Image (cartoon, rainbow, N blue to C red):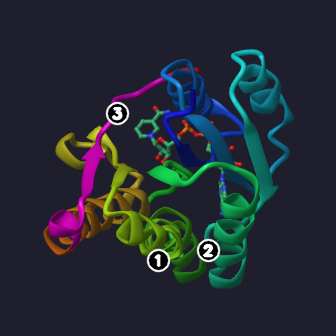
Amino acid sequence: MSKGTAVITGAANGIGQAYAQRLAADGFDIAVADVVDASTTKALIEATGRKFFSALVDVTSPESTLQFAADVAANLPPVVALVNNAGIYPWKSFADTDYALWRKVLSVNLDGAFLMSKAFIPGMKERNLGRIVNVASSTLWLNVPDMSAYIASKGGVIGLTRALASEFGASGITANAIAPGLTNR
Ligand SMILES: NC(=O)c1ccc[n+]([C@@H]2O[C@H](COP(=O)([O-])OP(=O)(O)OC[C@H]3O[C@@H](n4cnc5c(N)ncnc54)[C@H](O)[C@@H]3O)[C@@H](O)[C@H]2O)c1
């Protein structure tokens, strides 16, 4: 019996893939949006007996994220959870962080969480049920040089999370952030 669908961005690899495995083991069907092929994750999830859907989606694209929400709705049970995990973390000194890199990191790490929330919150609101988990980073509380864009983006992720929690709590939608430490997968 499915507990509903959990959407995880950036789950073709790394920590996101581990989130997908755990959520599948807990009874959720899994949808993955990633810019790279997610066939390894597909094999891991289908081995648990749960359903799986993925698409090549750039989370910085308003059109692709909306299309993905429509495709997930057509292929899997209703979405009850969204994990905004996709992220990039280039190590660059502030001097070497040009505006293009700054925009790129903010776009993937923060705009991505915004756009995926825009795409999936309407369905959650309709059903009065949703769990949003945004992936921040412990770097926000540590003294880590050479990650200005990244740390700024994760600060934004925490701000977005608090704002969503305030705005949608009454609609049965919770929003929380987690802040992993250095993790090797
Ligand atoms: N690994 C760590 O030590 C660590 C620590 C703290 C926080 N985090 C956060 O955890 C998350 C996952 O990190 P990871 O180490 O597993 O990274 P990873 O590089 O292994 O995986 C990130 C995934 O995101 C995907 N992705 C990148 N840009 C994308 C885009 N525009 N649209 C869709 N997908 C995209 C990549 O293809 C990849 O599959 C990130 O948000 C990262 O900031 C990681």
Q: Are marks 1 and 3 in contact (CB under 8 Å)?
A: no
**Residue identifier under label 2:** 60
Of helix, strand and loop, which one carries label 2?
A: loop
Q: Nearer the viewer, mark 2 or mark 1?
A: 1
Residue 92 spot, x, y in % from top left: 51, 56
**Residue identifier under label 3:** 180
Magenta stretch contains residue 169: yes
Q: How far apart in space, not on screen, are marks 2 and 1 (Cα)? A: 12 Å
Q: Amino acid at mark 1?
A: Lys
**Residue identifier under label 1:** 118
The structure residue drawn at horizontal position 34% and vertical position 33%, both measured from the top left corner, is 180
Q: How far apart in space, not on screen, are marks 2 and 3 (Cα)? A: 22 Å
Residue 64 spot, x, y in % from top left: 72, 75
Residue 36 spot, x, y in % from top left: 81, 49
Decide: few, some or many residues near mark 3? Use Cα within 10 Å; few <14, some 14-19, many ≥20.
Answer: few
Residue 101 spot, x, y in % from top left: 57, 72
The structure residue drawn at horizontal position 68% and vertical position 47%, both measured from the top left corner, is 32
- Mark toward the start of the polypeptide (2 vs 1): 2
Q: 30 left or right of 119?
A: right
Instruction: Give the quadrant of residue 58.
Output: bottom right
- Mark toward the start of the polypeptide (2 vs 3): 2
Residue found at the very far front of the displayed protein: 1
- Pointer 3 residue Cβ closer than 8 Å to ligand 1: yes
**Front one among 75 and 139:** 75
- Pointer 2 residue Cβ closer than 8 Å to ligand 1: yes
Magenta residues (range): 168-183
